Amino acid sequence: MNIRLTQIALASALVAGAAQVAVHAAAQTPSSVRVCTMPGSPSAELDKSVARAVLSTAGIAATFASRGIDDNGGDDGISARELSKSLQRDCDVIAGFPRSSVADGSDSQLLFSQGYLHSGYVSVTLRDTHAANTNVAAPDGKITIAATWSSPSQLIAVEQKNARFDLETTSRLTVDAVAKGRAQRAIVWYPAVVAYRRAHPQQHFDVALAESPYADWNLVFASGPGTQQLQKRIDGALARLRSDGRLAALTRNWALPATIATVSATTRASLVRSPARYLDGPTQPSPRANVWRVSGMPAAGGFIKVAATTEAPSFDHDQVAHGEHLYADSCAKCHGEKLEGNTAPSLIGPAFAPAANSHLTIGGIYQYMSTNMPADHPGKMSDEEYADLMAFLLYTNGYDTGNAKLTAQAAQSSTTPLNAGLRH
């Protein structure tokens, strides 16, 4: 497995926390704005082009920051606090902010425009008649799938069966893993494929839509509190650009191919059995801090014990308590203090642990976590610590404690799907 820790990719920017963003305009539309793009975004060229057209149509002058939103070069993700500081320092509007039903950001104080590019995560293979082994499994029956760390592609990749993983740190390297033969397949955000093709026009890929609740995304403009009038002007400009065809012309080369752009209602319903809007008030209750914290587990509400027929490995209360501390120290910055997702995907709720028919197994999650996490220092914990962390994840997703401790061996060998249930 290749692990390269340099910078986060676009899709790692799943901002869930409340961003206390100071802006120049509180109630009135400013005459000029500073525009930033997302860090390492393969769509930055598109984002700037759309921003120029939108703001010009809205009658607002635009200047572009020399760098995108970042955290001073760190490689361990962007916290809500770091995002807030960067916004205050560098820009008033973020172009190319990714939104989805899984990581919506509506619980933050950011305001969002309508989407200007509907795209998604795709499965990429090499189109080469001479590469007969592109999708041929190794003797152990597994193929190598490339994914981008600290992004939705991680969890989409883990959902794949009979796979080992090539973990890359940018979406460009994820596509490159297929092009250079390090992996037979890649899970990556589609604009990264577009950007890679532009840099390597001789390279051809076969692309299919990734079937996962983490796959569907829109690019929008994001800004801080008090910018309702600015976002109203941006939405009005987007509507004009959409009606006269200019938006379609700008985004045409970045949009998903028509052959894979449509997912049937039946398929979509099967992928998202319950709306996974953790940050925008889910239709089913999502656990809050006072629900999953070991010290304050309520007598009613929240998640309940999974049926014994799932044959999940046992873990005890002390492991959960220790796992909670490990999570706070090593995981919360990227995955959120309440597991709600921040610069990395949520680790709680129906998209991560659905009520039934999960493709994620407890053993698969443990193996991936113990090998690749935390992203800034993979494998830094002991087997016992990873087992305790797994116990905490099981507990927060509806599994109840038992009398026996969870061992690393039991966690890794578990083939039980990660299914959670809600207490009624």
Image: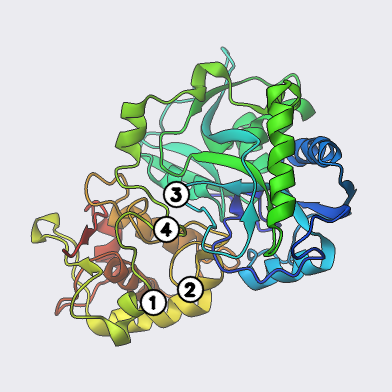
**Mark 1: few, some, or many residues within 10 Å (few <14, many ≥20)?**
few
Which amino acid is tagged 1?
Answer: Ala
Camera-near label (2 vs 4) is 4
Residue 22 shows in this picture? yes
Measure the C-alpha gap from mark 2 to mark 4. Answer: 13 Å
Asked whether, in this view, residue 323 is left or right of residue 380, the answer is left
Q: Residue at x 19, y 65 (%)?
A: 313
Q: Which residue is mark 4?
A: 278
Identify the secondary structure beneath mark 1. helix
Q: Which residue is mark 1?
A: 289
Measure the C-alpha gap from mark 4 to mark 3. Answer: 16 Å
Camera-near label (1 vs 3) is 1
Which amino acid is tagged 3?
Answer: Leu
Identify the secondary structure beneath mark 4. loop
In which quadrant of the rendered image does the C terminus lie? Answer: bottom left
Q: Residue at x 68, y 32 (%)?
A: 239
Q: Are marks 1 and 2 in contact (CB under 8 Å)?
A: yes
Asked whether, in this view, residue 334 is left or right of residue 171, the answer is left
Report the front residue among 107 and 391.
107
Q: Position of residue 236 (x, y in %)?
A: 71, 38
Image quadrant where residue 196 sits? top right
Q: Residue furthest left?
A: 309
Q: Which residue is mark 3?
A: 155
Measure the C-alpha gap from mark 1 to mark 3. Answer: 23 Å
Q: Residue at x 34, y 42 (%)?
A: 272
Camera-near label (4 vs 3) is 4
